[in-house]
Image (cartoon, helix red, strand yellow):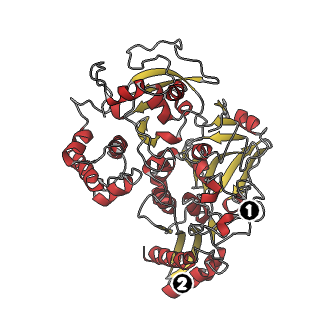
Amino acid sequence: MSDKEQSNPQNPTRREFLSTTGTTAAASLIAAYMPLTANASEEEETSGASGPTIDGAMPITLRINGKDRQLRVDPRTTLLDCIRESVLLTGTKKGCDHGQCGACTVHVNGRRVVSCLSLALMHDGEEITTIEGLGTPEAMHPMQSAFLECDGYQCGYCTSGQIMSAVALLKEPCGADDASVKELMSGNICRCGAYGNIVAAIQQVRKRA
Amino acid sequence: MHSFEFTRPENAAAAITVAGQAKTAQQGADIRFVAGGTTLIDLMKLEVETPARLLDINHLPFDKIEEMPNGGLKVGATVRNSDLANHARVQRDYSVLSQAILSGASAQLRNMATTAGNLLQRTRCVYFRDTAMRCNKREPGTGCPAITGSNRTLAVLGTSEHCIATNPSDMCVAMAALEAIIHVEGPRGARTIAFGDFHLLPGSTPHRETVLEPGDLVTHVTLPPSRAGSRQVYLKLRDRASYEFALASAAVVMNLTGGRISYVRIALGGVGTKPWRSPEAEAALAGKPANAANFRQAAEAALRNAKPQSENKFKIELAKRCLTHALKTAANG
């Protein structure tokens, strides 16, 4: 879940391994989503584009997890693809890419949305929170801890979307019973079927709040 | 997804001027307004919609719910569905609308989808959504394979030999029963459209779904003043308990005076090619005692002209039971 793993050439992460052994075709695909700076994990963004110029790309500023990101994106870029491919925050997952599964759930100005059905350009100047902005492995958000404690996942692919939805639910009108939680979580599909434990995790956080 | 030009018009007048250059405001429009994006971006990914220009209207001042001097409510075009459903006044006086919206989509989608976007929500017919298939709505004149194909979820009311696609909206069913009024600004000025006149039957032109013309921008919807003692119910029946489109749904707005029905408005969802107001069911109940026999009779009247397809005959009885139960619930509430 964390994207803060330190890069180590002797012991690369799975993602680093895959991205450095990709084919030329894959590399050209990735280039279509080049961030302004080649490595978005750098602390300081520069204003001049260092990557290839994309025809028709437009400038936007997204405030993601409290940090302003100045980007140039093709108008077709969804908020999801922008977060994953331009800003390189890959905790947000692409499931169906049609607003049906909830894996891509993030918060925009504090409210949960599916980032696959929104264009990045529609969010210029807005506040985006992704799973990386909720907590860290050392200081987890109570919902992240509850998912761990209650075993609210199996394969983990839907988990970041589930947790983003669950955190937003805490501030929404929702009845006290499990049925109300299930209803408000119905936009997040878990194909492993961890639903019972997901509801338990959410109820645990609500009871402790 | 095809390439397009993305702009943010400064104000409504600028948006209308640009959109007025479009060849059509219907299926395949070359210029589209975008707000929530939950329908349009989806269809653009499928290449069912391929606009050359998108006009982002999210920043225009249509995001408010306001009390009207006559006691009605003015709902801005870009008010999010979740804000409308959870608005205190809507929950109190127009609860059928709140119930309908909360029965649709997911919490995330309701946070994105807007009033006007929901008015223009497109059908979920699988033939419409798949460009490898023929579809009269997507490509006029190519035929309707749904009629002899997969049609279990499709319409039984308002169909034609050219199209049997269901209107998928829950919000619209409630608005039809509430007799909402749609406010539009266009190249020739502002006008209002009664809810029942906004959506079109497919007939021989299923690609035309509404009366909107190029440049027409829905600015807001008004709800008439609520009636004291109004009983309101939205009942939705579907394959899953949540996050699924209706197989049949019913919106009921009813007033009782001494056990008799003094006012009733009825609309059905999941069964019609447009949000289906039923004056037949309303007429069957006007002035009658609120009892099970009369409710069933109204349901029979509502579905009298229903035409089943090969896989959806069950919807006719389902819709009747749905309406009967909704009427009972309203009367007992």
Q: Where is residue A96 drawn, in percent x and y?
A: 47, 47
One can see residue B42 in this view: yes
Query: Mark 2 — on which chain does it sit?
Result: B
Rendered-image quadrant of the N terminus of chain A? top left
Q: Where is residue B98 drawn, in percent x and y?
A: 48, 58
Q: Which numbered disc covers residue A100?
A: none
Residue B291 horizontal side relative to residue B131, left or right: left
Q: Residue at x 53, y 14 (%)?
A: A49
Q: Mark 1 or 2 closer to N-term?
A: 1
Tell us which disc is closer to us: 1 or 2: 1
Which amino acid does the dot numbered 1 rest on? Gly
Establish whether labels 1 and 2 are both on one chain: yes
Q: Judging from the image, what secondary structure is the residue with disc 2 in?
A: helix
Rendered-image quadrant of the C terminus of chain A? top left
In the image, residue A46 above or below residue B82: above
Q: Residue at x 49, y 30 (%)?
A: A82
Question: What residue is disc 2 on?
Answer: B296
Count neighbours of disc 2 (C-alpha within 10 A) and say few if under 14, some if 14 to 19, many if 20 or more.
Answer: many
Residue B302 horizontal side relative to residue B231, left or right: right
Question: What residue is disc 1 on?
Answer: B143
